Image: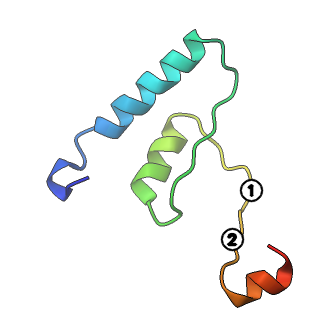
Amino acid sequence: MRRDRRGRGIAGALKRAQIAKAIEAGYERLYTESEERNVPMRTLNERLGYEPLSALVVLRGPGAARMGT
């Protein structure tokens, strides 16, 4: 998203609409992901009731091949 569009509540509105539709459809759990450095999105997710599950470690490159991933 362009920087001049940030901070206007668009992501929050979209997430709230998504949550409302999921509840309407009978979902009991929702999961979301965001880049660890994206503090505004992580803060929004927290405000909407999302809780961290656990850390995810992703290995790439030669070390990952040796680890069997």
Q: Label 2 amino acid? A: Val
Secondary structure of the residue carrying tag 1 is loop
Residue 23 coordinates in the image, percent (x, y): 58, 15
Residue 63 coordinates in the image, percent (x, y): 75, 88
Residue nearer the viewer, 9 or 47: 9
Residue at point 51% right, 42% down?
Answer: 45
* Residue depth check, mark 2 versus mark 1: number of the one nearer the observer: 2
**Label of residue 54 in the image:** 1
Q: Which of the 4 image quadrants contains residue 31?
A: top right
Cα separation, mark 2 vs mark 1, equals 13 Å
Residue at point 60% right, 12% down?
Answer: 25
Colouring style: rainbow
**Above or below, comparing residue 31 to residue 52 in the picture:** above
Residue 10 coordinates in the image, percent (x, y): 29, 36
Secondary structure of the residue carrying tag 2 is loop
Left or right of 9: which side holds 48?
right
